[in-house]
Image (spheres, coloured by chain):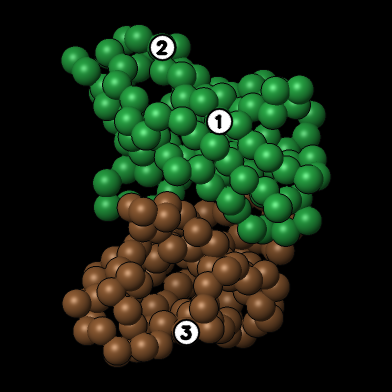
Chain colours: A green, B brown
């Protein structure tokens, strides 16, 4: 079974500062990994994904994440936070053999002007 | 292409009643998954349908059921509602059962009183 750990439910970051959201996963098979963002009263939007190949993946809105197998991690970063980045972010893992996503608890990001 | 649509967006029901939620996937997508999102438990997988067959099922009681029609539209039903069933129910579609990109709808907010 797959599982994801995201520490720190609320993350505050100053506008223009680095955004770093940590994600560690557990999987019995080589995983597919995802980051989703959720704005208030909306569904989930895919930010980026790792399936195979290059371990540094770039997504939308300037976000990127690096898959580190040795550390079982898939941390999300953005060099410079913008006010529009305020949202909830979820890391998810799936078994490549099916569509079942296992999500972390999420990080609520607050951007301070 | 139109995105995933879910109806209704908001619903208020009384304990003991039953409810049916509807999801229309992106045109051409044959896989539909359902997730429950609550503040306490986070995002949890309910089930996945592909070509009118349930392919995966999460750890929810039998009160939660679903089905998929030949046009890939899906419904989920919750019988004998409990207060704890209050949640945002999200539907996601993907092109096939092993596709790694799931597209989420805006969700149905169910409140049980």
Residue A8 numbered mark, or none: none
Expressed as whole percent of the image width and height from the top left, the position of residue B59 reads 57, 69
Q: Is residue B46 above or below residue A41?
A: below
Q: Name the mark nearer the viewer: 2 or 3.
A: 3
x%, y% of residue B79?
40, 88
Q: Which residue is mark 3?
A: B63
Q: In the drawing, what numbered circle is on residue A23?
A: 1
Tell me how far mark 2 sits from mark 1, CA to CA: 16 Å
Q: Chain of mark 3?
A: B
Say whether residue B4 is visible.
Answer: no
Separation (CA) of disc 2 from disc 3 = 45 Å
Quadrant (top left/top right/bottom left/bottom right) for the C terminus of chain A:
top left
Q: Crowdedness of circle 3 by 10 Å Cα count: few (<14), some, many (20+)?
A: few
Q: Is residue A46 above or below residue B23?
A: above
Left or right of residue A9: residue B99: right
Could you tell me which secondary element the residue under label 3 belongs to? loop
Q: Are marks 2 and 3 in contact (CB under 8 Å)?
A: no
Label 3 and label 1: CA atoms lie apart by 33 Å
Residue displayed at 60% across by 31% down: A24
Q: Chain of mark 1?
A: A
Q: Is residue B22 left or right of residue B39?
A: right
Q: Which residue is mark 2?
A: A18
Say above or below: A6 vs A76.
below
């Amino acid at each position: 079974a797959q599982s994801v750990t995201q520490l720190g439910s609320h993350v505050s970051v100053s506008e223009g500062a680095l955004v770093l959201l940590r994600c560690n996963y557990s999987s019995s098979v080589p995983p597919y990994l995802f980051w989703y963002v959720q704005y208030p009263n909306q569904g989930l939007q895919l930010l980026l994904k790792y399936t195979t190949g290059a371990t540094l993946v770039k997504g939308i809105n300037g976000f990127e994440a690096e898959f580190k197998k040795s550390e079982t991690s898939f941390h999300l970063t953005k060099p410079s936070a913008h006010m529009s980045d305020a949202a909830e972010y979820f890391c998810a893992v799936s078994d490549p053999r099916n569509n079942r996503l296992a999500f972390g608890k999420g990080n609520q990001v607050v951007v301070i002007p | 292409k139109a995105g995933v649509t879910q109806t209704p967006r908001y619903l208020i029901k009384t304990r003991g009643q039953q409810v049916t939620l509807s999801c229309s996937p992106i045109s051409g997508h044959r896989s539909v998954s359902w997730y429950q999102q609550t503040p306490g438990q986070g995002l949890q997988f309910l089930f996945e349908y592909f070509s009118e067959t349930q392919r995966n099922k999460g750890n929810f009681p039998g009160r939660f059921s679903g089905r998929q029609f030949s046009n890939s539209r899906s419904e989920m039903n919750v019988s004998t509602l409990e207060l704890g069933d209050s949640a945002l129910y999200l539907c996601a579609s993907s092109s096939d059962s092993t596709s790694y990109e799931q597209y989420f709808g805006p969700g149905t907010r169910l409140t049980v009183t």
